[in-house]
Image (spheres, rainbow, N blue to C red):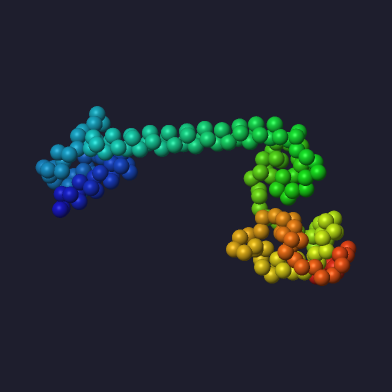
Amino acid sequence: MEQRGQYITLLCEQHQCGHIPKDRMIKVLLSYDNPVMTKFVIDSDGKYYNERMDIEVKKRASYCESRKLASHSRKIYVDHTIDHTIDHTIDRMDNGNSNDIINTNIKSKEGMQGEIESKKFIPPTIEQVIEYCNERNNGINPNKWMDFYISKGWMIGKNKMKDWRAAVRTWEKTEIISQPKKTWKKPPDNLYQ
């Protein structure tokens, strides 16, 4: 067991630091005639190394380098794909689309790429909700709608809300409206702060 411990210690040392100087070998093995010494060969600099560990270290370094190159080529492919998609779609985008995720007024590829990467939901202002409800003439009380989703933490069931306009449209289908449709006005400025 003592020799096994010495052998493992030397393998770890070689893996971490490279070939081992003779004085370090003697310090770990406690003697020059230790049977563990036969598991190591001497290189041209007079340092000791285990041939199998040397092969494994080189294989691992080669693998890491290949993964780094593959990762780099995937990034180039993704960047190329985004550029290609932007080139072919930016001119065809409908300027009437008011989608929060894709801003159709973007003129540069860099801006478009930033929009694609940032799909984080941003809660609407009460003014936006009022404007949207009035535009759709749906009779939904924007204040009630806003209070409901603020109280829920902008969650729909167990999921975070992604598109507030879709939530308004869903209310149109499920909300029973007993009042006549009316146009809503902006509440006081400090109501939602």
Q: Is residue 97 above or below residue 51?
A: below
**Could you say where residue 158 lies in the image, as x and y percent from the top left?**
59, 63
Image point (17%, 47%), residue name: 29
* Count of numbered circles on the image: 0
Could you say which quadrant of the image residue 59 lies in? Answer: top left
Front-lying residue, 109 or 60: 109
Could you say which quadrant of the image residue 168 lies in? Answer: bottom right
Q: Is residue 97 left or right of residue 15?
A: right
**Could you say where residue 129 lies in the image, as x and y percent from the top left?**
79, 60
Front-lying residue, 48 or 108: 108
Could you say which quadrant of the image residue 161 lies in? Answer: bottom right
Image point (76%, 61%), residue name: 172
Q: Is residue 185 visible?
A: no
Q: Is residue 23 left or right of residue 116?
A: left
Image quadrant in which the C terminus is located? bottom right
**Could you say where residue 185 lies in the image, as x and y percent from the top left?**
88, 65
Front-lying residue, 112 or 95: 95
Image point (67%, 40%), residue name: 113
Q: Is residue 81 visible?
A: yes
**Could you say where residue 86 lies in the image, as x and y percent from the top left?**
69, 35
Image point (64%, 45%), residue name: 117
Q: Is residue 100 above or below residue 170?
A: above
